[in-house]
Amino acid sequence: MSIVHKFGLAMLAAALGSSALAGPTVQVAQGKVEGIVKDGVEAYRAIPYAQAPEGNLRWRAPEPAQSWPGVRDASRAGPACYQADGGAGWGPYTAEFIAPGPFAEDCLTANIWTPARKTGRLPVFVFIHGGGFGGGGANVPIYDGATLAKRGVVVVTIQYRVGVFGFLAHPALSAESPIHSSGNYGLLDQIEAIKWVKANIARFGGDAANITIAGESAGAASVSHLVVSPLAKGLFAKAVAFSGASMGVPVPPLREGEAVGVKLAEDLGKSTPDELRNVSAAQLVERTRAIPDPGGKAPPLLFVPHVDGAVVLYDPSIGDRPIASNVAIMTGYNAAEMVDFSIDTPEKFETAVRARYGDFADRLLRLYPHATRAEAEASNLLMARDRYMSGVLIWAKARQKTSGQTVFDYLYDHPYPPAPQGKAYGAFHSSQIPYIFGNLGLGNRHFSAGDAKISRQWQDLLIAFMRKGNPSGPNGAWPPASQTKGIKAMVIGDHPGFAPVISSTERFEAFRDYARQGGVLGLM
């Protein structure tokens, strides 16, 4: 082969590498990003929406992202926000449910999936991950947005600060804040991310006027906070809270959060914000990490949003308070959320009911049979479901009456396939997410054609909601809570349709009376 021929081939290869083989490029406000295209979907990962919240920016409101020169490589995932390693999993949660490393404070980024061929402006689905406000990330395998994007929507997942980095409150941090608050940095990150999406998503084919924010678990609680927060008003058109808008995550007043922060600072031997900012991320995580329960229960929530009068005005699980964003919301629960499967005898069941419900326990124990082991196990599962489904029905009515918000509530009951030789946990907390995103087949579990049908069912409902604000579809008409009576809501799963979601009216009335006496009906 001649030198000229070799040179020509080299030039051809270079040309192919720089043009024909190059990924799609999009110009955003800060510069150009180059993604990848696969199976008809463009993917752009780890696009900064804010500056790295490290050094002097740790425990401050997010600063807008800075511009970058040239073309930024957006083909690979970025790090999740700093947190303890989730390990190999626990309870029903295998690797596909857990945020992979690496972890870093430089983490405020968004991932975007959009159809390669677009027709008009597409609905935008912005997903806020769960993780108890202490972990999780946008790169959890079950959150990959490619399959959902194929259905004709733009999918966005966002990173936000978690744990001590996202929710540490301290009097000195509040004093230096322009809004005289601390401890809600993770929510401020979410707001900044949605602002960035609204400003840039048209360049990816999305409709900036039709953004649906959605989240699961802590992400659902975040959605509820954003609906209430005046700082998020006007940023989105619809909302979805998977597990769920009435979940009852503790929302302490700022002074209580500040007291926790003071105790942590004392334990670390620090007294000023600058001294705290000089503590390594690893040391902060080690001092504040939550240990998951091997039985599948959620770990304790150490750092969560606080009522500060600026970002968070009140606990959004209270339905009869005013809201900032009067948008339609879709919310509900899975049939086996947060169930303590160690309660498997009559004695354990009665002990657990008395511990949770106090003086109200006798009424509930009369309503739920538990004379045998089988009865106790069945009643343990059913009582949990009846409690939080009662909570969401009551919450929806209160929200509609006070604010006129349109609420579509549901119960999801399709069991997730167990891992080999693993315990069957049913429709456990977060088990609907692989179906919503269409990411079946992850992990060493057996999925069937029936699972694919459930995934299509979820996506049909969500896409209908994103497009027209009403999730009615193949399951039939889905009336909002304001038009329903009794104990009915939409059932999503193997026998879909509008049906009772609480096991009896008498049991619903018992939980309603418990709530009227100040009892909490959420998951927590």
Image (cartoon, helix red, strand yellow):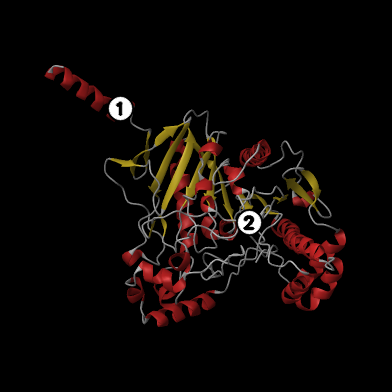
Q: Horizontal and vertical percent for residue 480?
A: 74, 48
**Do we see residue 79 in this rendering?**
yes
Name the one closer to the observer, 350 or 487.
350
Instruction: For mark 2, give the secondary structure.
Output: loop
For the C terminus, the quadrant is bottom right
Q: Is residue 81 above or below residue 433?
A: below
Is 375 left or right of 469, judged from the image as shown? right
What's the mark number on residue 19? 1
Residue at far front of view: 421
Query: Which residue in the structure is indicated by mark 2?
Result: 429
Q: Nearer the viewer, mark 1 or mark 2?
A: 2
Q: Horizontal and vertical percent for residue 503?
A: 82, 57
Name the one closer to the observer, 446 or 522.
446
Q: Which kind of residue does numbered mark 1 sit on?
A: Ser
CA gap between label 1 and label 2 equals: 45 Å
Instruction: For mark 1, give the secondary structure.
Output: helix
Q: Horizontal and vertical percent for residue 420?
A: 60, 49
Mark sitting earlier along the chain (1/2): 1
Is 24 left or right of 143, judged from the image as shown? left
Q: Which kind of residue does numbered mark 2 sit on?
A: His
